[in-house]
Amino acid sequence: MCDFDFQPIIDVIVDGEGDDAAELVQEALDAGIPAADIIDKALVVGMQIVSDKYDQKEYFVPDLAASADAMTEALDILKPLLEQKDGEDKGTIVIGVVKECSQEIGKNIVAAMLSGAGYKVYDLGTNVSPDTFISKVKEVNADILAMSNPMLQTTKYMKETAEKLEAEGLRGKVKITIGGASTNPETAAQVLADAWSKNGNECIRVCNRLMDDLQA
């Protein structure tokens, strides 16, 4: 199994070919490749290439959307296999785009990658108010709140959410990570977040670290 060629799956993710992605993933499973390996060695790798191409202005929003759709097609096959492993969720994450924002391509990619990496992810979509974030965090007993903020003018809503989380007495139990086009490490400090990530791969690493902090 160590000699399995993941490149065809990587290629169809990069090219945004959803039907082919699903077919190739099923072939990999039939060959005995574990779902987690397919995610780590093909899907995550493919989406990192897509993210890099977008950063380098080789890809644009439609390309991101096509690749995200292809990854979703693949994950639809793999998720049930991951969910069969009782007690192996890495943690629970609530994710969404902040109030007054409707740009969700990046958030969708990150949510899919976190789910594929073994997290239980509750995706609230776009235009999520601070109160809605807090309500969901409490409802599902989330470990991590991940907020996406594509626009500079809506940064205030991330800080408002963090302050409300503190007021609810949950700040010591819930870690906050942020991302989005208008954010950077300095933004994380400004809005009282614990971490920042620039892409899906980095967000997985950040969430792994935050979970380690919670369990320490």
Image (tube, rainbow, N blue to C red):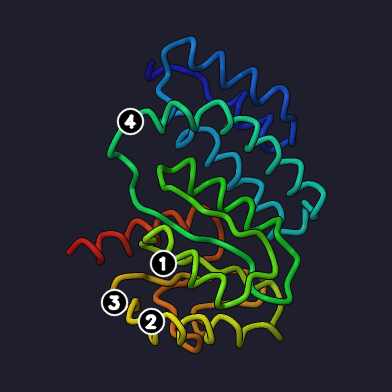
> What amino acid is labelled 4 in the image?
Lys
How many numbered marks does the figure carry? 4
Q: What residue does disc 1 label?
A: 138
Residue 13, x across and y down, in percent = 66, 35
Q: Which amino acid type corresponds to the residue marked 3 in the rendered image?
A: Gly
Q: Residue at x 55, y 77 (%)?
A: 131
Q: Quadrant of the N terminus?
A: top left
In this picture, residue 195 sits left or right of residue 59: left
Query: Around disc 1, counting alpha carbons within 10 Å, would you say few (fewer than 14), some (14 to 19), or many (20 or more)?
Result: some
How far separated are the C-alphas under marks 4 and 2? Answer: 33 Å
Q: Specify which label sits upstream in the sequence, 1 or 2.
A: 1
Helix, strand or loop for disc 2: loop
In which image quadrant can residue 184 be found?
A: bottom right
Residue in front for this viewpoint, 85 or 28: 85
- Residue at the image position 60 percent from the left and 39 percent from the top: 46
The residue at which mark 3 appears reads as 172
Q: Residue 168's mark?
A: 2
User: In the rendered structure, which disc, 1 or 4, sits on the residue that comes first in sequence?
Assistant: 4
Q: Give the Cα distance between marks 3 and 2.
A: 10 Å
Label 3: state its secondary structure. loop
Instruction: Give left or right: position of 5 versus 157.
Output: left
Marks 3 and 1 sit apart, C-alpha to C-alpha, by 13 Å
Quarter of the view holding residue 157: bottom right
- Describe residue 131's horizontal placement relative to residue 35 as left or right: right
Given this view, does label 3 or label 2 mark the residue nearer the observer? Answer: 2
Question: Which numbered disc covers residue 85?
Answer: 4
What residue is at 46 percent from the left and 10 percent from the top?
Answer: 31
The disc, 3 or 1, on the residue closer to the chain's N-terminal end is 1
Q: Are marks 3 and 2 in contact (CB under 8 Å)?
A: no
Label 3 packing within 10 angstroms: few (<14), some (14-19), many (20+): few
Q: CA distance from mark 1 to mark 4?
A: 25 Å
Q: Position of residue 140 (x, y in %)?
A: 41, 57
